[in-house]
Amino acid sequence: MIIHLLKCHTSISAISAMLSVHWSTIQKIQKHIMDKALAAFETCLKKSNYRPRYLAVDEFAIHKGHRYATCVMDLETGFILWAGLGRSMADFEHFFKSIDLSLLSRLKAVAMDMNASFNRLFQKYCPKGPIVYDRYHMQAQFGRDVMGAVRLEEAQKHRQEAEALKKYTKETNNPELQKMAREKSHEERKLYTELKKSRWILLKKDDHLNERQKTHLLDILSEHRDLAICYAMKQEMTRLFTLTDYEEALAGWTKWIQAGLESGIPALVKFARQKQKRIKELAAHALYPINTGKLEGFNNKIKVLKRIGYGYRNMDYFFTLIRFHSLPKNYSSSKFP
């Protein structure tokens, strides 16, 4: 009866109330069947001499308080090969110790963000597998740490200027100067407000902007030199991720990093310095245009599982649940939540 109700997507708490069975007993039954389904699938993989070619690694938050777990996904099947607590080097090394390393013998590339733990361990255990830094993490970080920081800095300058002019109107007795200062202060305040609201206009692609937004963007860039430089760097970054020739990409990323270092814009210089040692992994996208998008999408399913369960105290059960829900749809098994 419990198995049937689980297959009908009935929650554990509802089954517990319906049958007067403790929820931990229902959870044990569910985990037993999930383990059985995963074992059967892994047996099928072994019989077919399964070897993943493209992997993605990413972390996700377990709950508030900066507690994380890490997932490793086969990008071709969408199956979660491993899920474990933590994201440090010691935590992630459990993945390599829990599998037969011959499983990674045909590995072509691994997509990941710039977490040093992931990078170093794959270089240690799979030195021949190229690492590809995820373009979306790179672009999101640039938008947040460079475009966002420079935009707010420029907006703050307008605000300070407006406040200084407002103060000046109280200090001077000349009516004409007071009028000019008030008008200029109002203009600076308006520029401050417009710049604060221009986040998405600066981050969107050109072809996603309407005519009004394009005009507004040109006005912003013409009045703010640092923002114009950062915007041009963003556009060039997008172009570099479309290249398919490794040597061209390597040369392009080298010039991009150098331009960032020489820009004189603190946020951009800092960002370029952080990425200076990662040029080869960024250029590797030209050879293997993979990313962690599929795994990021699956992270949304993990969030739904967390919300349905109101969190989980048994991490072994939670990670089994995650792997169970990643089983390919064409695999015939008695699936239930």
Image: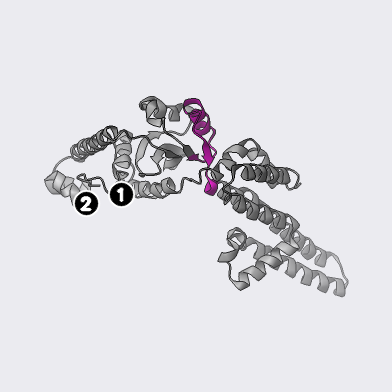
SS for dot 1: helix
Badge 1: residue crowd in 10 Å (few <14, some 14–19, many ≥20): few
Numbered tag placed on residue 55 in the rendering: none
In front of the other: label 2 or label 1? 2
Q: Does residue 299 appear left or right of residue 152 in this picture?
A: left
Q: Which residues are magenta?
A: 111-137
2 or 1: tag closer to the N-terminus: 2
Which residue in the structure is indicated by mark 1?
Answer: 308
Residue 132 part of the magenta segment? yes
SS for dot 2: loop
Numbered tag placed on residue 9 in the rendering: 2
Frontmost residue, 220 versus 104 = 104
**Which of the 4 image quarters holds residue 199?**
bottom right
Q: Position of residue 204 (x, y in %)?
A: 58, 60
Q: In percent of the image, x 68 and y 39: which residue is there?
A: 273
Q: Does residue 124 appear left or right of residue 217 in this picture?
A: left
Kind of residue sitting beneath label 2? His
**Which of the 4 image quarters holds residue 53?**
top left
Frontmost residue, 289 versus 316 = 289
Q: In percent of the image, x 41 and y 27: which residue is there?
A: 96
Q: Position of residue 200 (x, y in %)?
A: 58, 61
Frontmost residue, 252 versus 304 = 252
Q: In percent of the image, x 67 and y 43: which residue is there?
A: 251
> Whole-Å distance between the Cαs marked 2 and 1?
11 Å
Kind of residue sitting beneath label 1? Ile
Q: Position of residue 11 (x, y in %)?
A: 22, 49
Which residue occupies the extreme right position in the image? 174
Q: In percent of the image, x 70 and y 56: which residue is there?
A: 227
Q: Position of residue 82 (x, y in %)?
A: 37, 35
